[in-house]
Amino acid sequence: MAIEIIATGRAVPPRRLTNDDLAKRIDTNDEWIRSHTGIRARHIADDSTACSDLALEAAKDTLSRAIETGAVGEKTPEELALTVDLILLASSTQDYYGHPATACLVQDKLGAPNAAAMDITVACSGFIYGLETAAGLLEINAKRRRALVIGSDILSRITDWTDRASCVLFGDGAGAVLLEKTAAPSEGEGRRGLVRSILAADGSGAGHLMLRRGGSREPFKAGEVVDIPPHIDMDGQAVYYFAVKAVTDTIKNLLKEDGIAIDDVDIIIPHQANARIVQAAAKRAGIPEEKFYLNIDEYANTSSASIPIALDELARDGKLKRGNLIMTVGFGAGLTYGGNLIVW
Ligand code: UT7
């Protein structure tokens, strides 16, 4: 069997916050942000929008796209939603603390009553972990055929807007893919779909990127006055060095395990955290920067959504051809990292 991406979709809030807009609120400037991160703007959800709202929009976009392109036999998104067997939603900014899983809220609003639904919490590596998890769950049970994997994050809600070293980095968005289990390629046809993944973690670095308050370790107490809402607490330099190594190692290991050379890969879609991380990893691995797709200038770091948003942009712009070999690579809180190899 093969596990193929048959459609992609995305949802990005319309409100755009530029570096100059930020510079009016905190001590920063466009030149610093661009030269240190490659970011020019980010999109910010309005107060009434939660993670499930963006996720639902991205999921609906994906189902509509599957119908438009003739990737499925169903005639309407509603009919198609009934055939979805699994919804995996990667996020760090779920609608509710702990439970219910945001994937369940999406399952209900999408009209996908036949889908099992769960969240994946590995921060920015969530989509990479999600693809491999969904593939495994489709493969293990003959009854499951289709899965939606969604990355949705509203990082603006867990950002400390007074901390210039971190608040300039983040944005909001969602991206999704529809996976389908198809017959194994016949001899001579070549590979299709998700062919290999690396999922990894280094929990010793957990403290470098953390939402400290609100969990069972440091719960809020009755009567406590909180000066600042729960927010991302980050050691930027530690994450930077970890990220460059994680990206370089993942690329090398994916190539080695698959027995291929970098020239066999058509495009690398990295997690969009900082363009400088990608440039440093490219240099260290001896890979031309042009091999990496970057859209961080427009969206900043949208965490679990960054890779599926990029994938959807590439797919819709006609930049992915059937048979192309795509590599994803990412890292995030945990610390987690990994990558996927996908034949389009
Ligand atoms: O998904 C994972 C999420 N996190 C990441 O990917 C973060 C990874 N880390 C990074 O991307 C980088 O470490 C940062 C972008 C966060 C910081 O870049 P840096 O080149 O490591 O800067 P720095 O922290 O060493 O700061 C250099 C200077 C400092 O000033 P002094 O002490 O040299 O006078 C900072 O105060 O830049 C200053 N600075 C700023 N200046 C203007 C820090 N943030 C800003 C800012 N605007 N927004």
Image (cartoon, helix red, strand yellow):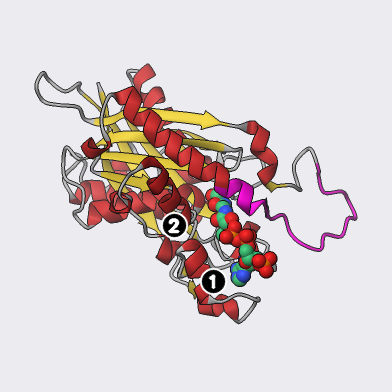
Picture coordinates of residue 320, whole percent (x, y): 21, 48
Residue at the image point whose x is 25% and y is 25% from the top? 2
Q: Is residue 314 left or right of residue 158?
A: left
Label annotation for residue 224: none
Residue sticking out furthest to the right: 223
Image position of 234 with respect to 330: above or below: below
Answer with the quadrant where ligand 1 appears in the image.
bottom right
Picture coordinates of residue 297, whole percent (x, y): 41, 65
State yes or no: Cβ of the residue under disc 1 lies below 8 Å from any atom of ligand 1: yes
Discs 1, 2 touching: Cβ within 8 Å: no
Pointer 2 local density, CA inside 10 Å: few below 14, some 14–19, many at least 20: many
Picture coordinates of residue 12, whole percent (x, y): 42, 62
Q: Nearer the viewer, residue 289 or 302?
A: 289
Residue at the image point whose x is 63% and y is 47% from the top? 238
Image position of 235 with respect to 99: above or below: below
Q: Could you tell me the amino acid type at mark 1?
A: Trp
Tell me if I can see residue 174 in this picture: yes
Q: Could you tell me the amino acid type at mark 2?
A: Ala
The stretch of residues the image draws in magenta is 218-240
State whether the magenta stretch is mostly helix, strand or loop. loop
Q: Secondary structure at mark 1?
A: helix
Name which of mark 1 and mark 2 comes first in the sequence: 1
For label 1, the residue is 32
Quadrant where the C terminus lies? Answer: top left
Picture coordinates of residue 207, whole percent (x, y): 70, 42
Quadrant where the N terminus lies? Answer: top left
Q: Nearer the viewer, residue 100 or 254?
A: 254
Pointer 1 local density, CA inside 10 Å: few below 14, some 14–19, many at least 20: few
Residue at the image point whose x is 49% and y is 56% from the top? 301
Q: Secondary structure at mark 2?
A: helix
For label 2, the residue is 275
